[in-house]
Image (cartoon, grey):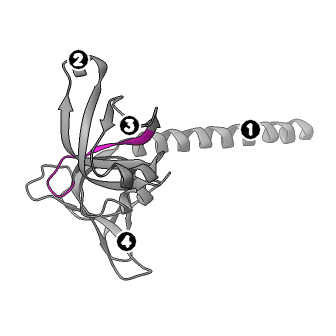
Amino acid sequence: MRKRKADSKRVYLPCLMVLGLMIFVSVTVFTDGKSETITGKLSLIGNEPFTRLICRPEVGAVDQASETFQLGGELLAELLNLQGASVLIEGNKTGRLSEYRLPIFMVTRYRLLAIEGSQPVVGILKEQKGRLLLETEECKTYLLSGDLLPRVKEYVGGKLWLTGEIKKGFFSWLTRRYNLLPNAFGVIRKP
């Protein structure tokens, strides 16, 4: 009989551990699965080498969050290149405070809304048959032309934002191809 009691303990303990792990994972997934959005302006605070990127809410923005957050996550390197821009970020509050006593927000996605009052086009810069193209996440293609092309060309393969005059062709709504004469650009992610 002693042997049976010892065998049953060996079976129940792993089963309880697996059950506990399943409960922990399901609670974590369902509570942290809700993402929130914040609309704001990106800026740096602090002194080198202790600078931190924050998102301040836009004046008049109607959001769930109306406070300033310190940002974190895998997209932080891209967001650092967008200082001063207005963005819509999606992610989760961590519930922790930073060394600057700001709540930390882990960014999972973002959308660039405006740079110095202009709405930018964001995409990957490509070269095709000697022409520069900007392909967006929305599967739109912008053929680039103008004086900025020699400076933009060195970033082929990178993620850029461009502002300027967009010209639509007669069938642009069907082909999703547009012409863009950029007047400003910035590098979000180098090639």
Q: Which mark is residue 52?
A: 4
Give the residue number, with chain letter if any, for mark 1: 12
Q: Which mark is residue 148?
A: none
The answer to whether residue 136 is seen in the rendering is yes
Seen in the picture, residue 129 relative to 108 is either above or below; the reply is above
Q: Earlier in the sequence, mark 1 or mark 2?
A: 1
The x, y position of residue 79, in whole percent, is: 36, 58
* Quadrant in the rendering for residue 138: top left
Residue 176 within the magenta-colored segment of the rendering: no
Q: Earlier in the sequence, mark 3 or mark 4?
A: 4
The x, y position of residue 71, in whole percent, is: 36, 61
Seen in the picture, residue 97 relative to 7 is either above or below; the reply is below
- Pick whichever, 17 or 179, lies toward us: 179
- Pick whichever, 79 or 70, lies toward us: 79
Please name the residue shown 28% across and 51% down the image.
147
Q: Earlier in the sequence, mark 1 or mark 4?
A: 1
Q: Amino acid at mark 3?
A: Leu
> Seen in the image, is 121 located left or right of residue 170?
right
In the image, which residues are magenta?
Answer: 115-126
Q: Which mark is residue 171?
A: 2
Q: Earlier in the sequence, mark 3 or mark 2?
A: 3
Give the residue number, with chain letter if any, for mark 3: 133
Q: Earlier in the sequence, mark 3 or mark 1?
A: 1
Q: What is the secondary structure assignment of the residue under circle 3? A: strand
Which residue is situated farthest in the left direction here? 60
Distance from Cα at disc 3 to Cα at disc 1:
62 Å
Of badges 3 and 1, the one in the foreground is 3
Seen in the picture, residue 78 relative to 18 is either above or below; the reply is below
Q: Earlier in the sequence, mark 2 or mark 4?
A: 4
